[in-house]
Amino acid sequence: MNKAIFLDRDGVLNHEINDYICRVEDFEVLEYQIPPLKKLFDEGYLLVVITNQGGIGLQRYTEDTLADMHEILFNKFEEQGAEIIHAYYCPHHPSVNGECECRKPKSGMLLEAIAEYNIDPSLSVMIGDKPRDVEAANGAGVKGILITPDEQIDYHKIKAVLEGTSA
């Protein structure tokens, strides 16, 4: 089985603007996140993005625009020798689409990734900047780590949680 680092996107991998990022020009990758994640990638962890993108459901931006943003993100990681294997996203917004199983805090996207990539949840963590990220992780049997928006990921803290030496 594989092990993974699940990553929320906005506020974790790119700058949080406290609104939908609707234009590629406004998508700013937090490049300081790449080195600690590359260390984990080099240790055999799959890097997987798990992100709510309700702006699609609200027609604030398109799936093509989202794909362009994710291409920028993936390329930044590849330039530094790491690979994000997949970006799962929920395009739904509750006010337009009603309830769905994929939108965090539900665990649908994590469960899909776990099944698709044969991931052992007990060997994996989810890093997010909102309580719903941790809730979604826990619902899939994955440990959740809450950071503040745009906070640098601490490799040693992640390792401690993975090894069960810290909460």
Image (tube, grey):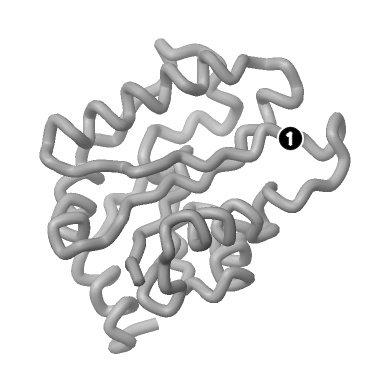
User: What residue lies at 69% left-to-right and 47% top-to-bottom?
Assistant: 103
Q: Position of residue 34 (x, y in %)?
A: 21, 44
Pick whichever, 45 or 8, lies toward us: 45
Q: Where is residue 102 in the image (x, y as percent from the top left)?
A: 68, 49
Callout 1: helix, strand or loop? loop
Crowding near the residue tagged with mark 1, few <14, some 14–19, many ≥20 C-alpha atoms within 10 Å = many
User: What residue lies at 74% left-to-right and 26% top-to-bottom?
Assistant: 57
Q: For the view shown, which residue lies furthest in the bottom direction?
A: 165
- Identify the image quadrant of the C terminus: bottom left
Q: Where is residue 51 in the image (x, y as percent from the top left)?
A: 54, 42
**Disc 1 residue type (three-letter):** His
Residue wearing tag 1 = 92
In this rendering, the answer to whether 98 lies above or below 57 is below
Q: Where is residue 120 in the image (x, y as percent from the top left)?
A: 42, 73
User: What residue lies at 24% left-to-right and 73% top-to-bottom?
Assistant: 159
User: What residue lies at 64% left-to-right and 39% top-to-bottom?
Assistant: 90
- Identify the image quadrant of the N terminus: bottom left
Judge from the rendering whether residue 22 lies leftward or rightward of residue 96; answer left or right.
left
Count the marks.
1
Judge from the rendering whether residue 150 lies leftward or rightward of residue 34; answer left or right.
right
In this rendering, the answer to whether 60 lies above or below 114 is above
Judge from the rendering whether residue 3 lies leftward or rightward of residue 57; answer left or right.
left
